[in-house]
Each structure stands twice: as structure tokens, then as C-alpha cells.
Image (cartoon, grey):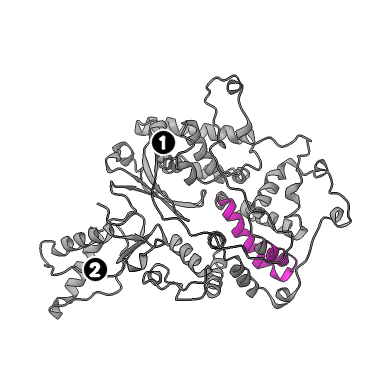
Amino acid sequence: MPQIEVRRLNYRGAAEQAGRVEFAVGDALRTETTDDGRLILVRSVRLGRIGLGERGASRAAATAWRELVGSARHGGSSGAESANCVWFTSLAEARALLMRELARGRTPFAWFWALAVPDWRRMTLAQYVEQRLALALAEPSGEAVAALVGEVVAAGATQALAAAILARVPIAAATSEPVERSPPAVAAGHPPAPAAAVTIGAADLAERAAALETLRPVPAPLYALLERLAARPDAAPLLEALARGLVQRSHPALSVAPQRLARLSLAVIRLLRSGQGRFAQSAEVVPESGEMAKPPLADQVSPGEAEGRPTGRVRVEEPLRRPPEPAFAASSDPVERAAPPPAPECRELASSAAGVFLTIVPLLRLGWREWLAGHPDLLLHQPGARQLHTIAGHYRVQSGDAVWDILPQVDRTIAPPESFTEALELWRRGLDGWLRRRARLKLADLVSRKGWLLPGPETTIVRFPLNDIDIRLRRLALDGDPGWVDWLGHSYRLVYRDRPLTGPRLP
């Protein structure tokens, strides 16, 4: 049942019937509207003359709702301010688009912004970021900080976040000059040490690579500020909260193992304090055994593939198309990057393998999350994202399918252990066998289901045709909404309907 909130109800009629009318209208709105996962905002709706008997209010509410949703416009589209009904994929998308508008120096005036983001209250960009940061730092898991950093970077408002962080730093730290760091060999005018000289234990290789990957996409102004915080002991609590948020953003699976999350956060802080966050990326790290790190999985082929024979080997990394990350600025002076171009119109993407997202609930039922919690060392290799890529790759989902753009991206800077890759394949086989026994359904049939994908910054809505409801899945509750999936750092909603979720005046 959807969550409905009515700000004001105007009624003309007998005063003694007001309470009865209010109950009838509220009940009609809750029962006659459908919850498709979106945040839908309505400026006003007229029900006309309704009878209080024989479902008069329900029929009026159902008719009015169909008209409203049929003419709804996306909140980020042109002309949305004049629409009577607008929608967002989620509250997170509304916040991200509001942040984008504020970062461009605009003051959003449309009627729906105050309803979509009630905690905004017409603040400026600086005030809003400062408030969001205070609320995010109070949340201990780090997920709120991760979401805020993602919104700020996407909107090009890094300077506003840096200013909000500085406002929370003690005066001594805020007034101090940034600390410049360089490796001793470089500072003395000598060439850097060869790659083979940088040697760490094999057990710490993945953690070091994960810490570097956490810092690599951080914009230069924010990175310079983190280095300044690392040089101040009195700013340690703030730095720990920010590091935890950055780790959550790059490795959401660590939320199932809080101790491992804390370890990686400390590794990030150590890189910042040692000044190696900028320079260690160019050094090649080798384990104590002297063997070079294995190449990415996409470069590994089995003997059968080398001879041209078809094999069942999973090529996890091949469909990935990751854009290049921006390099750090050579100077620590905070230089704001140009604002990103306007976001494209939100639209559904057709996919012939939308059923990949139907595997999330069966994986949970099979004990996937408990297995992750029992193997914290594997969480640094993005097991959730790699498992979904393994499933899609095994069943030969076409490289141009939209599902590859919606699936969580996989980092290829370091290859996971061979035992980890084998474990993912065993889980795929186990899931296939479990579905065959319990639901009389093959995993291949589940993956190959066609549908439409509506992506968002926090929530992705997957729509299937109404006739694709499968009683084999429904009786076992395997086609329900996964909701927030912590080991993927994303939320998924599954909807069965024939009408598209986007566009005005839809049938």
C-alpha cells in the first residue's frame, strides 16, 4: 500500500459530514492508487461531487489518479514547474537535482521542490550543504556521508562541501596553512624508487589497493582538505567520519562487516597522513613472494578459449565500460571544477536481461549475505557487483544491453584471488540448482526476462510486463522488492505493469 500524505483537504457540504468525508477520501487515496516505487507529487486534485455510499469516493479517487499520473512530468524536465503532477524516482533523486540547481546559482521556484525536499526550506547552497553534512555526520554507518559526497560531486559543488567541512573544524585547524607532502626521494631531486622496492605483505595488498581506489576519484579540492584534516589531531573525529563515508561509497559491501569497514577507513587515513595518497598510485605494488599481481579477469583466458573452443568460463570484466577518473591537481589549492552539463531526460531503458535483478532476492534467501559476513576479507573485491556480473556474463547477455550500464560497476585495478572467482561460480551453480528444485525454474530463464530499467542515484525501478508474473516465483515470494541492498549500496524496486513509468499523457 502506498504512503499518501495530504497537506490540505477542502470540503464543501454539511459540517457534520466533514469527518466522514475526510476518512472516505483518505481511504480511497490509499486503496485506489498504485505504488510503483516513485515519489509522486500532486499540486491539486478535484474529486468533484462524491457519494459516501457504494464506493463513490473510491471511484472518484481512482479516476482522478489515472488522469494525474497520465500527465505527470519528471521533476528535472523542462516545463515541470507548470505541471500539476511531477515525479522523481526517489527522494534521493529529488535531492540530487535540487543540489544541481543550487550549484548553478539558481533559486528553484517551482511549487514541488518544497514538497519533494521538505528539509530544504529555501536555503542557499552553502546553508543546505552545511545542514546535510551535520545530519550525515550524525549517522554512524557512513551511508549518509557517502550519499552526500556523491550528490555534491555530481552537482559540481565541491567547494560548498569543503566550506561546510571547514566550518566544523576547530579554529586552529581552519586557520592553518595546508601541509605540502612529497616522498623524500622526490623532494631531494632524485628519481622515485623503482616499483620492485615497494613491497608489502600479500595479506595487505587488497586493503592497500582498496584504500587507493577509495581516494582516487575524490576531487582535488576535497582531497586537499582531507590532507589538511589529517595533519590536525583535533580534527580526527571529523576525518574518521569522512573516511568512513568515502569507503562506503566505493565499497558498500563492507556494511555487512563493520570491523572490516573500520580497518579500511583507518587505511585511508594513514594514506592521507603519510602523503602517499597522490604518489603511491603510480608505484607498482608487489607481494612479498615477488610475483607480480595477476592481470584483470578480462585478460585471463582458459585453454579452451585460447584454442577457439566455446567454454563456460565467466568473463566478468568484459562488458564493463568505466569512464576515466579525473586526475588529481598538482597543486593543493582548491580549484572548483566546471559544473557538469544538464542531466538528460529521465527515461526507461529497454533490456532483454532485466531478469538479472530478479536474482537478488533468491540470493538473499540462499544465505548470500550471511556468507559475505563470514568472509570479510572478500568484501574488498566487490562481491555483490561481481556476482551479478558473473551471472550476466555466464548467460551471454549482449554487451550493448542496458543492464550493463545499470549494474554496479566493478573495479579492475587489482584482480581478486582465484578462489574468490571460483566461489562466485559455485554460488551461480548453487542458485541455479536451488531454483530448479524449489521453483522448477532455470536461472537462465530468470535472467533472460525482458523489461525496462529506470535508473536513479539511489533507486533503480525495474518494470516487467504484467503478463510476466510467474506463479512459481510469486508463491515463494521471490519476485518481491529487494529494497535497499546494503552489499550493493543501492535500492531496487520491481514493478509489474504494461504502461511506461515515464513521459506525459501515457495510456
- Which residue is disc 2 drawn over? 45
Q: Nearer the viewer, residue 125 or 16?
A: 125
The alpha-carbon separation of the residues under discs 2 and 1 comes to 41 Å
Horizontal side of residue 408 vs 42, given as left or right: right
Q: Is residue 350 above or below residue 93?
A: above
- Image quarter of residue 356: top left
Q: How many marks?
A: 2
**Residue 435 included in the magenta stretch of the image:** no
Q: Amino acid at mark 1?
A: Val
Horizontal side of residue 412 vs 400, given as left or right: right
**Residue 234 included in the magenta stretch of the image:** yes
At label 1, counting other C-alpha atoms closer than 10 Å, the crowd grade (few under 14, some 14-19, many 20 or more) is many
Horizontal side of residue 162 vs 452, given as left or right: right
- Residue 484 in sight here: no
Q: Is residue 453 above or below residue 221?
A: above
Secondary structure state at the residue bearing disc 2: loop
Q: Amino acid at mark 2?
A: Val
Q: Is residue 331 above or below residue 481?
A: below
Residue located at (72% from left, 49% from top): 281
Residue 237 percent across, percent down from the top left? 66, 67
State which region is magenta.
223-252
- Which residue is disc 1 drawn over? 447
Q: Quadrant of the N terminus?
A: bottom left
- Residue 141 in sight here: yes
Query: Majority secondary structure of the magenta segment?
Result: helix
- Image quarter of residue 228: bottom right
Residue 498 percent across, percent down from the top left? 28, 46
Residue located at (63% from left, 65% from top): 336
Residue 81 percent across, percent down from the top left? 36, 68
